[in-house]
Amino acid sequence: MHIIGVYNIKGGVGKTATAVNLAYLAARQGYRTLVWDLDPQAAATFYFRIKPKVKGSKKKLVAGKLDLDEVVKATDFENLDMLPADFSYRNMDLRLEDAKKPTKQLLRLLRPLSKAYDYVFLDCPPSISLVSENIFRAAEGLLLPLIPTTLSLRTYQQLLDFLEGHRITGLELMPFFSMVDRRKRMHLDVMKSLPDTHDELLKVQIPYASDVEKMGIYRMPVQAFAPNCVATRSYQALWAEVQERLG
């Protein structure tokens, strides 16, 4: 089972769209795929037309009184399941602090699903917290959508500093440019300069596209309603590069 976190300290960078679209592509290839929506805003849950989990389930999960497979729900797409979020996830850090080995609770919860799924995508909240550290220690790879601006580069460096300071190793970092607007000089300059200092950067770039925004209208991955658009082709190329990187 491959566990892939989709993460950024900064919100509004295309994180949820990436998790939803890549999970859909994995499922289309026949892989048994799960999306765990860890963001209390529950955007991925909304995209898949799923209602929030039963109230109190988060507390029971962390306390070991509930298994993940008891709250997993099927989506409208074959091979693709969802572990939905709810607004109570905003307090998950408090629950994790009370648990034994608080930085490894998500990995403990996911291990029993290793025979049920080939890929698990974690749609992560935009922060650095105990939840984030759990994600870093559970995931095999970390997809990092970066808008090509100075602020995005700053938050990426903050993440690198955090990983080094907490001695988190063995995590495949996969930053890539997201919401790219080639009409903007800053975007072009950043995309030209960053690969010189960060060879971990993926080659595929996701453009700023209205079809991605329409996911909120159709409530489904972009390929499901616009299979031939530029955004669909970009996510397909991104998924191919991620698979190659993870082997």
Image: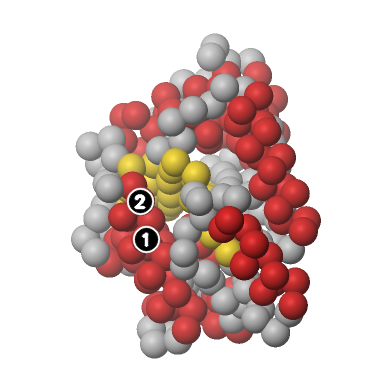
Q: How far across and how far down the image is residue 96, in percent?
A: 61, 23
Q: Image point 51% across, 62% down: which residue?
A: 18
Q: Amino acid at mark 2?
A: Arg
Kindly check if marks 1 and 2 are in contact, taking CB atoms under 8 A apart as contact.
yes
SS state under label 2:
helix
Q: Rate crowding at label 2 as few (under 14), some (14 to 19) or many (20 or more) other CA atoms within 10 Å.
A: some
Relative to residue 155, is residue 243 drawn left or right?
left
Image coordinates of residue 162 in percent, x first then y, are 66, 31
Residue 241 shows which numbered tag? 1
Residue at x-position 29% and y-position 40%:
1
Quadrant of the rendered image containing residue 131: top right
x%, y% of residue 57?
A: 53, 35
Q: Nearer the viewer, residue 96 or 162?
A: 162
Q: Is residue 179 above or below residue 75?
A: below
Q: Residues within 10 Å of mark 1 (few under 14, many from 20)?
A: some
Q: Secondary structure at mark 1?
A: helix
Numbered circle sitting on residue 245: 2
Q: Going 59% across and 40% down the picture, which residue do you hit? A: 55
Front residue of this view, candidates 107 and 209? 209
